[in-house]
Amino acid sequence: MVAETGPVVEHRIPLSKERVLRAAITVADQGGIESLTMRKLAEELGVEAMSLYHHVANKEAVLDGVADVIVGEIEEAAGGFEVPDDGVDWQSAVRQRILTAREIMLRHPWAPVVFETRTTISPILMRYFDTLLGLLREGGFSYDLAHNAMHAMGSRSLGFSQEMFKPDNAEQADEDAAAMLEQMAEQFPYMVGMMMEIAHDDPDSTLGWCDDQTEFGFALDLLLDGLERLRAKA
Amino acid sequence: MVAETGPVVEHRIPLSKERVLRAAITVADQGGIESLTMRKLAEELGVEAMSLYHHVANKEAVLDGVADVIVGEIEEAAGGFEVPDDGVDWQSAVRQRILTAREIMLRHPWAPVVFETRTTISPILMRYFDTLLGLLREGGFSYDLAHNAMHAMGSRSLGFSQEMFKPDNAEQADEDAAAMLEQMAEQFPYMVGMMMEIAHDDPDSTLGWCDDQTEFGFALDLLLDGLERLRAKA
DNA sequence: ACCTGAACACCGTTCAAGT
DNA sequence: ACCTGAACACCGTTCAAGT
């Protein structure tokens, strides 16, 4: 009883939806999204799993909330979701906004699967898309072309890289790539040819791990340049 | 004992990895990927869950196998993964191959999440990408530009649509959209403006449900046209 | 009011045992 | 050899009970 007043006070920070969502992001950042269980989340908060249900309806609500917090991080990093109403260079404005979103997503590599599994679009996420659409409109797009543009950007507009080859282990990827070079030249001639040329041009490059930032920028600008051409032509 | 010879024979079709994977695809097609559990899969095969482990190492191996079967379906639909070695119109060849992949993916809407959660690239999937790369090379791409092109296409090269707005319930989406039009004009001005124009131009269109095929084609051709421009300039 | 212990219905998977 | 029953360690979630 005597020693209880000290440390016990720390445990008395009351639970709240805010704290639960923040803790969920911490757990996912540290152990990946598959490590985010209600029990683990409770442990992170020094509480029993069942206590969480007084602040969130269920696990889906946790994931909904986590997605919203992340959009909030994007909004903060972007300095708000404002749409300047004249003299916008739409292309650099859209590029900047998407690259900001990407920065946040890089901090939370598990975030894309959370967004992809949401079944409704929350108000703040809708606000993100509305202002992105606004940048296109104020930049001279018709609604029809802007509509097509939003679909063409797809999840890339939230900073998702959409890569098919994304090893979670770069060393393993390099080993795999090296094994391919040795054994599979006749099975995958073009892949092997490409890797050999990359290795020749830049001997220090890792074979299995491309420069994500460069590749993301290439794809984004390819889209934006194509859209600008269509806008100017219309 | 007397009546056993008849129906029992049906149950004697021996289990095999092939049958397990086919059944897994059937279960996922019918109930979605979240309904694919080892117990459900066993039930589909008229067997106990534990029997599956004599033919597949674990659930991850089931998902690996399912992904391979789907790439096999693409290969069959494409008439093989050949790369004609001269006189290729790369743009229509690549477009055709990707649209074929998309046809298969539309039959298995759950497939993208299966591919996205694989941690290794299987030989047949590598073969798909190798021949796609081959189409670019034979169409006049440098390895460097072809490399960038593969990254820019990303998961779209397997027919994934990468849409952010994909309601699993079109009616619900329409209700949501209608609610937005009424209540949220000042909160999402550009979205509301876009929807009102679409509704005006095509009064029969559902607000929440766009023409996926048109949107996919628009995005794909935007990419392919941009790549052709870069190829011709180089 | 906020938190909890025990329990339930599900998972994937192991193991020893059946034919 | 192929299949199974019982069990284990995990899930998300409910409910009645505690303070």
Image (cartoon, coloured by chain):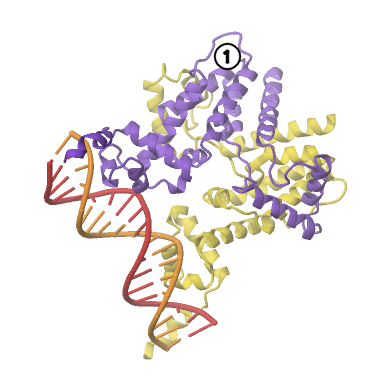
Chain colours: A yellow, B purple, C red, D orange
The image quadrant of residue B198 is: top right
**Camera-side residue: B36 or B1?**
B1
**Camera-side residue: A96 or A35?**
A35
Left or right, C12 with respect to A147, comes to: left
Q: Residue furthest bottom?
A: A2
The amino acid beneath tag 1 is: Glu
Question: What residue is shown at x 56% (from left), y 34% (from top)?
Answer: B106
What subunit carries mark 1?
B
Q: What x and y, as percent, mark residue D10? A: 35, 59
Visible residue check, residue A171: no
Q: Secondary structure at mark 1?
A: helix
Q: Quadrant of the N terminus of chain B?
A: top left
Residue linked to disc 1:
B138
Q: Residue furthest front?
A: B2
Q: What x and y, as percent, mark residue D8? A: 24, 60
Q: What x and y, as percent, mark residue B145? A: 61, 24
